Amino acid sequence: MMGFTQVPNFLLKSKKLSSDDKMTSAMLLSYAWQNDYCFPGQRRLADRLEERSVRRNLKALEANGLLTIQRRGLGKTNIYELNLTVTSDVRSRLDKNVRSRMVR
């Protein structure tokens, strides 16, 4: 598969997300193209990572407000809505560690 995927800088520079979280986010972005959503299966996302890791990464992205997961039922892929607009709430969750270090 040729091409490239643009990943927002706030994701790349986040200290709160693991490198696997960032890779999972990039994979979702590669499937979303011009849309804010995509629906690849977890096995397909696990092309570069273990399937269990992908599930953990998806939960981390959801917990940080970067992803909304819509479950469609047994045998169907989930719909992943990417929340790429950096709101103050998302920024505070992602940069909490950085700010606390600056205050010290």
Image: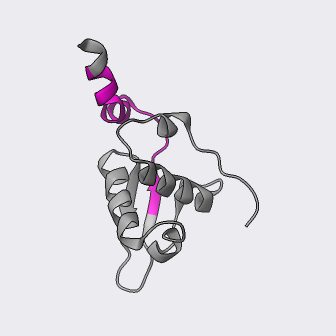
Splitting the image into 4 quarters, where does residue 80 fall? bottom left
**Residue 82, x across and y down, in percent:** 48, 52
Instruction: Give left or right: position of 20 versus 37.
Output: left
Q: Residue at x 60, y 55 (%)?
A: 35
Using the image as rendered, state which of residue 19 and residue 77 is in the foreground.
Answer: 19
- Residue at image position (48%, 70%) is 46
Magenta-span inclusion, residue 42: no
Residue 10 x/y as whole percent: 49, 34
Q: Is residue 89 magenta?
A: yes
81 up-or-down from 13: above or below:
below
Q: Residue at x 35, y 85 (%)?
A: 74
Between residues 11 and 49, which one lies in front from this camera angle? 49
Q: Is residue 103 above or below residue 13?
A: above
Q: Is residue 11 above or below residue 69?
A: above
> What residue sits 34% from the left and 25% below the top?
98
Q: Main secondary structure of the magenta part?
A: helix
Residue 56 x/y as whole percent: 32, 61
The span shown in magenta is 80-100
Extreme bottom residue here? 75
Q: Nearer the viewer, residue 58 or 33?
A: 58
Instruction: Locate the N terminus and report the quarter of the image it occupies.
Output: bottom right
Q: How is the image coloured?
A: one colour
Residue 25 vs 73, above or below: the answer is above
**Can you tell which quarter of the image residue 7 is in?**
top right
Q: Residue 51: x and y, percent?
A: 41, 72
Residue farthest right in this picture: 2
- Which image quarter: residue 104? top left
Check the image and name the residue furthest to the left. Answer: 104
